[in-house]
Amino acid sequence: MVSVFFAGVQQDLKLVLFAPIMCALFRLAFILIYGTEKSPAGHWLKWAECFRYGFWWGMDWNAYVYLACLLLVSVPGAFLPVYFMAGDSIRALIVTAWLMVLYTTFMGKMIFFYHFHDTFNQTLRLGKNADKMNFVDIFFHQNHGIWIIIGYVPYAAVCWLSAKFVLSTPVIAIALPEQEVLRYAIGASMFIVSVAFFYWLRYGGTFRHRKKPEWDEVPRVVKDDQFLCKAVIDDLIALENVFKHPMNEMLSHDDVESARILKPLMGKVIKTDEKPWNHVLHKTSGNRIKKPSHIFWLLGESHTQALLDPGWTRLNLMEASVKFRQHSGVVSINNCLPAGPISQPSLVSQIAGIYDDNMELNENVYFWKAGIPTSLPVQMRRLGYRSVFWYGGGLNWGSLEHFIPAIGFDDCHGGSDICPDDAPRTWLGVYDHIFLQNAERLIKQSDDGQPVLHFLYTTSNHGPYRMPMEELGFDAERILADAPDEVRNLRGIAYRQLGGIWYADQSLIHFAERMMEAYPDSLIIVTGDHAGGLPPYGHGVIPRDEATLRELRMPSFALYHRDLTWDMLAHNDLASHMAIMPTVMELIAPEGFEYLSISRPLTEHIDHVVTPYCWMDDERIGDYGTRSAQQLAPSLDPVPMENDIEKYRDERNALAELTGWVLRHPELLVTYR
């Protein structure tokens, strides 16, 4: 029995390196496909440390392959000779199954990085309520899904045959004493050593738990490289980090602790029976522009600042926005933080007046029945404005059909409802120009001379970019005339994405210009829900091949009113989505008008901006998720990443805590239907 167990343990040991070797190969593929440095030449230490630390960090999961073989095969095989004979096949099956898991997570990471330029992060959690058919469309038509699925077959075959080949190599026999007690003692010692070896592997080559690999201990030479610090983390470790840290931590706080955390926002420790928004009350100092009859809040899907930054403008993909910003009365601020990292939390935060903070307020049944006094439509109602919401897709997305009326909008329309049944559309919504033309038609038909806020949200600038770009006006020869040959020669998805960015900008801005003409006194806000449709890196447009934090995070932002000047916005260079509503109030409301806002208006000097996700000041932009920062100013050249740095953490926690307070106290919500 002991000799059989010893033989089994040797077979287990032969398979120990299978998973970490595969992880290393996946790490190399990730670097070669997405990294800016394709060779370790001149960077040997950085690459070596990345693979060394990644090996041991990955053992946190990969060591379980060894443990599974030990407990499921070697131990029972020592007592059951028939089972022992099938042991190698079972071991090969275990290893192959685990390597299939690694393949799946790696392909998932590759797709996630393609869209978000990051390894798995909290954004992953928000996919549960997204349009699943759009995911399928993107998977098959933008991310080569059919080849990924086909790849399972040869991959599994190679893994199985490799494992069987290694297991076919001979094992070493052991000479055992005749005394039965000694044989059992040796067998018990083997088992103890085998289990200890598992813990040694899992703790990264040490028995000291405090030395276990984790993010804080990543070698500095790796962490200072903004790409390798993503490559060093195995995919399962990244997934574990996403689900190990719950997004709703503030929901576990009691009111006493919550009041303490809210102090930076409230100005003091509030009483637990108080309504927190009583402490974010502002009074206007008097209108700066004539009260507009129409306000148009235009939220463009993935309408990104990066393509308006120096260097990228040569692509001419935002030519409509460039011309729009030259109009008298248009003020643009090129450093704007979004209210959310992706569409849903960004939209919901702007409307609700508090940060959604990935809590999906729109999917919360309490917010299907009642709203919140900080919300945009509720506060505009107090200024005499009717509020209408327009979305290019169906209002069933994100439960908007329930959320939008409850939050205070007087009316709401989906693209599928206002456009002809045969109107061309993607999974997300009707083509932008058709949606906006039909919205324009209904806006003009319903105009009764009363003040109205129209909030319009488009959908077309989104993968997999299968729209007929040439039919929609994308003349690549003209538009990309100043682009490098590498860009002009792009084909397939990359080419269609360029066309999608141009088309969406044209549709949005031409609508804004038509509204300027139809309603000369209108106030128009143009911004993106988040950054997206990123520039084509690595094709010679600029020397840099890697996105910066500003390019990954910042949407566009511009305001128009015929009387508006930059002086009225205090010459600010920093902005945020949550500053738009209070800015509107300060621009149009009479002196002494009271409104609620968690952000200061842009009519005051802004020296820093904080969201639950990012922060920025005059010098840097930082990310709370990665605790990293870069210079804020646009740069054509590579921008060094600063690690283990964050500012305004208490302010960030207070903003998130307010959302938690509201969710713990749904009785504070108010019915506005």
Image (cartoon, grey):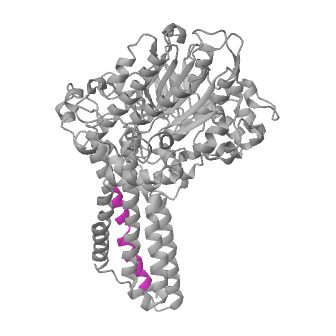
User: Which corner quadrant of the image does residue 95 belong to?
Assistant: bottom left
Tell me where residue 644 appears, x and y as whole percent.
49, 35
Q: Nearer the viewer, residue 177 or 589?
A: 589
Instruction: Estimate the x, y position of residue 441 in percent, counting from the top left.
Output: 47, 30
Pick the front one: 300 or 160: 300
Query: In the image, what residue occupies the spot 73% across and 33% down?
Result: 260
- Residue 234 visible in this rendered orientation of the protein: no
Q: Nearer the viewer, residue 613 or 659?
A: 659
Whether the magenta-drawn stretch holds residue 560 is answered as no
In the picture shown, does residue 583 fall above or below 646? Answer: above
**Principal SS element in the magenta part?**
helix
Q: Which residues are magenta?
A: 4-24
Image location (x, y in percent) of residue 623: 49, 34
Q: Residue at x 45, y 40 (%)?
A: 419
Q: Quadrant of residue 607?
A: top right
- Residue drawn at the location 74% of the way across and 42% of the way down: 666
